[in-house]
Image (cartoon, rainbow, N blue to C red):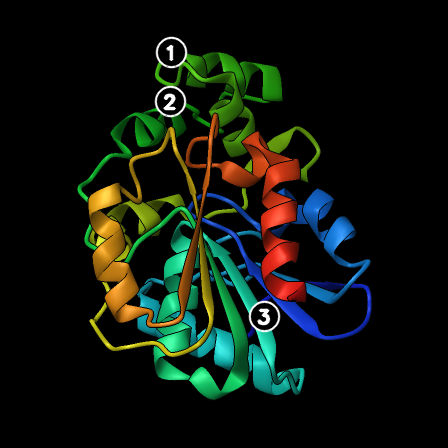
Amino acid sequence: MKLHHRILGEGKPMVILHGLFGYSDNWQTHAKKLAEYYQVILVDQRNHGHSDWSYEISYDLMAEDLKELFDELNLEEVILLGHSMGGKTAMKFAQNYPDYLEKLIVVDIGTKTYPSHHEQILAGLHAIDLNVIHSRSEAEEAMAKYIESNGVRQFLLKNLYWAQKGKLAWRMNIPVLEQEMWAILQGLPSNEVLIPTLFIRGMMSDYILGEDIPDLENQFSDSHFVSVENAGHWVHAEAPEEFIEAVLSFCLR
């Protein structure tokens, strides 16, 4: 599948993959800073953003989508950065196509299978009936009954756009993401990755626990870990300065 993407800056390529329910716009602020050093390529994964929708979603498929993009743009020696679901796509790509990569950056996600934990988010999304809701404020009011965090609500509502006058639509394929959530949460194979890899985790997040680190170190033999205090799963949004410093310190050395 051809993926929608945007390019900022010049130089060595850095490809950034968003997480579940996100899209490339979420990374614009960071991309502008990183584009002072790299050619930054922001990607929408399948069923998200401006990329096409599909009834299928898996890490093998998303890695294949990414390879198609790399070949289209003639990319090599890439720094690949992914958050959450995008981090798993990045790790799967590193397992399948290591020769394309120079370095790998994984943000707050491991290789393990995760339990289902998106019920409240899905309930909030289902609460928005786009046949009767005709403004963002109405959408947020409906969502707030299920999702307490204002930050999470704003993150999700960025996916709403005006398909036509007075008619809102989603940029993400909610039915397929819900139906195939098991595939998004499943673990990756234990194939060893030799590429220099940075794991950035939020200390207020439970996605990478201390007990997970030894297994990740065994699988990613040239791995480094940065733990960011006072940050949860959205490390890059909650601690942007620390995040950019960690990325650049790893990439520029």
Residue 74 horizontal side relative to residue 207, left or right: right
- Check the image and name the residue furthest to the front: 253
CB within 8 Å, label 1 to label 2: yes
Spot occupied by residue 151 in the image (x, y as percentages of width and height):
52, 23
Q: Residue at label 2?
A: 127
Mark 1: give few (<14), some (14-19) or many (20+) Cα within 10 Å: few
In the drawing, does residue 103 fall left or right of residue 244? left
Q: CA distance from mark 3 to mark 2?
A: 39 Å
Report the Cα–Cα distance between label 1 and label 2: 8 Å
- Mark 1 residue element: loop
Residue nearest the observer in this picture, 77 or 127:
77
Badge 3 vs badge 2, beta-carbon distance below 8 Å: no
Picture mark count: 3
Which callout, 3 or 2, points at the residue further toward the start of the chain? 3
Where does the C terminus fall, quadrant-wise? bottom right
Name which residue type carries label 2: Ala
Q: Which residue in the structure is indicated by mark 3?
A: 79
> Which label was assigned to residue 231?
none
Image location of residue 13, percent across then percent down:
68, 73
Q: At x 61% / y 52%, what residue is drawn?
A: 24
Labels 3, 1: front one: 3
| Residue in the foreground of this view, choosing between 146 and 160 | 146
- Numbered circle sitting on residue 145: 1
In the rendered structure, which disc, 3 or 1, sits on the residue that comes first in sequence? 3
